[in-house]
Image: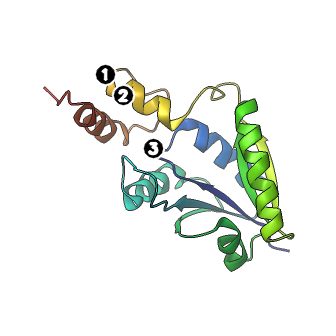
Amino acid sequence: MNRIAVYPGTFDPVTFGHLDIIRRGALLVDRLVVAVAVNTEKQFLFTTQERIDFLRAAVKNIPGVEVCQMDGLLVHFVEQLGAHFVLRGLRAVSDFEYEFQMAGMNRKLNADVETVFLVSGEETLFLSSRLVKEIAGMGGDVSRFTPADVIPELRRRMMVRLGRGMG
């Protein structure tokens, strides 16, 4: 049996927390599809293609991992791939509440879709894309939180967004 999982997210930007879940999740399955969500109601710092490119560079040496774009409902994407479950990371109780609700809704939409949770490692328990963007926007060092190739463009865009420019 070919075990396939989908790890969905916006990854705006990808963090070492995401990569921790991807590395550990890849050990549990034959194929892990990292699905970059397109959400027209959310404003992203990076385009879908940029987020995909950053992720592909970050996971290129992790066997069995692929990155692609996901439009529409997660359960439909999972069905199209013939995947067996959804992989989600948990950092805190607040994550659990949201993820528990999402897992329940996905099961209502398709009873065959299971959600598997991995608890974030202690090194990345506090990490979120939102916090990384805030730190970068204030000129802080984000090298311990996100891959090096993301940092220059992250800094530039956050400074512009916050009206600080780059001097």
Distance from label 3 to label 1 (Cα)?
A: 16 Å
Q: Is residue 144 left or right of residue 50?
A: right
Answer with mark 3 or mark 2, whichever residue precedes in sequence: 3
**What crowding class fits label 3: few (fewer than 14 Cα within 10 Å), some (14-19), or many (20 or more)?**
many
Residue 44, numbered circle:
none
Q: Percent from the top left, x then y, of residue 159?
A: 25, 31
**What crowding class fits label 2: few (fewer than 14 Cα within 10 Å), some (14-19), or many (20 or more)?**
many
Q: Are marks 1 and 2 in contact (CB under 8 Å)?
A: yes
Q: Which residue is mark 3?
A: 13
Q: Is residue 32 left or right of residue 57?
A: right
Dot 3: what SS?
A: loop
Q: Is residue 92 above or below residue 37?
A: above
Q: Percent from the top left, x then y, of residue 104?
A: 82, 56
Residue 139, numbered circle:
1
Q: Is residue 59 above or below residue 123?
A: below
Q: Which residue is mark 2?
A: 136
Exactly how many numbered labels are in the figure? 3
| Dot 1 amino acid type | Gly
Q: Is residue 62 above or below residue 131?
A: below
